[in-house]
Image (spheres, helix red, strand yellow):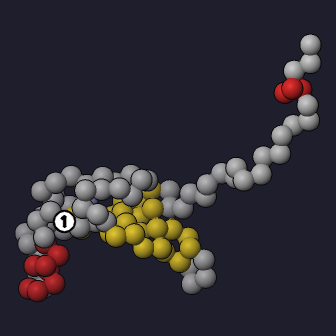
Amino acid sequence: MMKPSQKSSTNMTGTLPKETLPINHVYPKNDDRKHRLDSSGQCWCKPKRTDITDGKKVIGVRISHNSADEREFVEERLGELLDEDKTWGTKLIS
Ligand SMILES: [Zn+2]
């Protein structure tokens, strides 16, 4: 008995592997809530996604997280850190 699958191999167009670009998370250290720093780019703080380019093409993605303690506003308005351990960190995933 002939199985249909024994016919010529199927054309695999449209199933190219998704290009994975390095992701650079910029997140508030010692924040009131923990941030999700993985390749999903999903976090409770609704982080901002920006493409990193080399001038021509996109070579990565920056995920800028928002702090729960709103240190951005203190830094922006007073030009100083909310507290000395309330700094910003980066984590690169590639
Ligand atoms: Zn976050």
- Amino acid found under the numbered disc labelled 1: Ser
Taking 8 as reference, is 34 left or right?
left
From the top left corner, tell me how far across and down residue 1 is, in percent.
92, 13
In the image, is residue 13 above or below residue 78?
Answer: above
Q: Nearer the viewer, residue 44 or 30?
A: 44
Q: Toward which corner of the image does residue 20 lie, by quadrant?
A: bottom right
Count all numbered tags in the image, as a single digit: 1
From the top left corner, tell me how far across and down residue 51 is, in percent.
47, 73
In the image, is residue 52 above or below residue 43?
Answer: below
In the image, is residue 14 above or below residue 74?
Answer: above
From the top left corner, tell me how far across and down residue 27 is, in percent.
27, 64
The residue sitting at 11% across, 65% down in the picture is 69
From the top left corner, tell me how far across and down residue 92 is, in percent.
42, 60
Q: Toward which corner of the image does residue 10 lie, by quadrant?
A: top right
Residue that numbered label 1 is attached to? 67
* Disc 1 within 8 angstroms of ligand 1 (CB): no
* Quarter, ligand 1: bottom left
Taking 58 as reference, is 87 left or right?
left
The residue sitting at 65% across, 51% down in the picture is 17
The residue sitting at 48% across, 74% down in the picture is 52
Residue 47 can be seen, yes or no: yes
The residue sitting at 20% across, 61% down in the picture is 29
Residue 27 can be seen, yes or no: no
Taking 13 as reference, is 27 left or right?
left
Query: Residue lying furthest top in this view?
Result: 1
In the image, is residue 57 above or below residue 46?
Answer: below
Q: Nearer the viewer, residue 74 or 48?
A: 48
Q: What secondary structure is found at the residue carrying circle 1?
A: loop
